[in-house]
Amino acid sequence: MTFAEQLQADIELIEPALEQYLSRETGEGYDRIFEAAKYSAMAGGKRLRPVIVLEFCRLCGGDVEKALPFACALEMIHTYSLIHDDLPCMDNDDLRRGRPTCHKAFDEATAVLAGDGLLTAAFETAASAEGLPAETVLQCIRILGRAAGMNGMIAGQVLDMGAEHRKISLDELRLLQSLKTGCLLWAACELGCVAAGKTGCGYDSKKRMHREKLGLAFQIQDDILDATGTTEELGKPAGSDEKNEKTTYVTLFGVEGAAREVEAYTREARRLLAQFPGEHEFLEHLLIWLASRKK
């Protein structure tokens, strides 16, 4: 199976499962919150994080069906973060994935509640996993909480908001990005391994370093696209970093210098990936695809 075929197969596994988890019986008067949550969650996207969950589970010899609840839970958390990130009190963006953001399609209060609903639904979804030891499910829930919480993604968002309209150092930028972007990518790698029953196997430091390199390569490429792409190409407002006067790898190194950083971090992530046992050709191709993507 080619990389494109495997990627599509993973997405075709994730999409219906995600929709099913978000299709609950509703009572009269609050259907709108489910509509808003599904509007954002089912709007497409790369599905990068759930794909990584499945592929690391496969890499560790696990059953990807058993990892699927955790993959969907992680995508719910990612979607909630995008809904809140787009709000007027944060980035105040009107476009996401080529269509109006949740607060524009519905209203601001509904968007806040839809994000809250997706966050809580993520933990309900993870807790519903079947065919795994209770301790494994609990460990996956802990991973989700740690990655999404106040020492993880939320901390990164706080740093991101504090970095608007002022210059920050390279070390500060790396910390911001490792928390805001890297924590959910760490969770994706970790969830796949834990769901496969691979804990305490001596690869913790390699997983952490791989996540850091992957997260930085992914975010720097985002910085480049924000500076060089168009709104039509990206499906979201281009030039938002410049509008908010944010320090990025592009402002520090220029577009060409930032591109060299992407190449370097991608090479390092591939080197670390090669140290894992098992077949990791797909994950290598995924790294290359992420580094060369145009949106």
Image (cartoon, grey):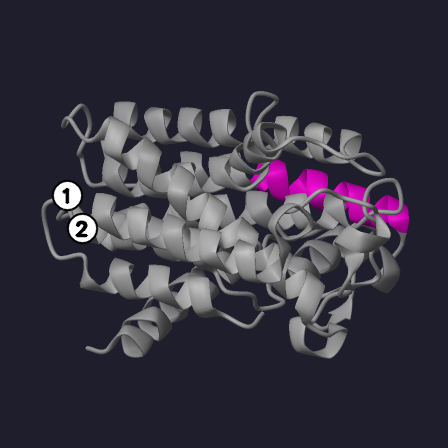
In the picture provided, is 270 more to the left or to the right than 51? left
- Quadrant containing the C terminus is bottom right
Q: What stretch is highlighted in magenta?
A: 108-121
Q: Upstream in the sequence, badge 1 or badge 2? A: 2
Question: Residue shown at 68%/69% (left/top)?
Answer: 228
Tag shown at residue 59 = 2
Residue 133 point in image, percent of width and height? 23, 29
Tag shown at residue 275 = 1
**What is the tally of numbered marks visible in this picture?**
2
120 inside magenta stretch: yes
Question: Residue shown at 82%/46% (left/top)?
Answer: 245
In the picture provided, is 228 more to the left or to the right than 107? left
| Amino acid type indicated by mark 1 | Gln
Could you tell me which secondary element the residue under label 2 belongs to?
helix
Badge 1 crowding class, 10 Å Cα cut-off, few under 14, some 14 to 19, many 20 or more, is few
Residue 205 drawn above or below residue 42: above
Q: Are marks 1 and 2 in contact (CB under 8 Å)?
A: no
Q: Magenta stretch mostly in which secondary structure?
A: helix
- The answer to which quarter of the image holds residue 191 is top left
| Amino acid type indicated by mark 2 | Leu
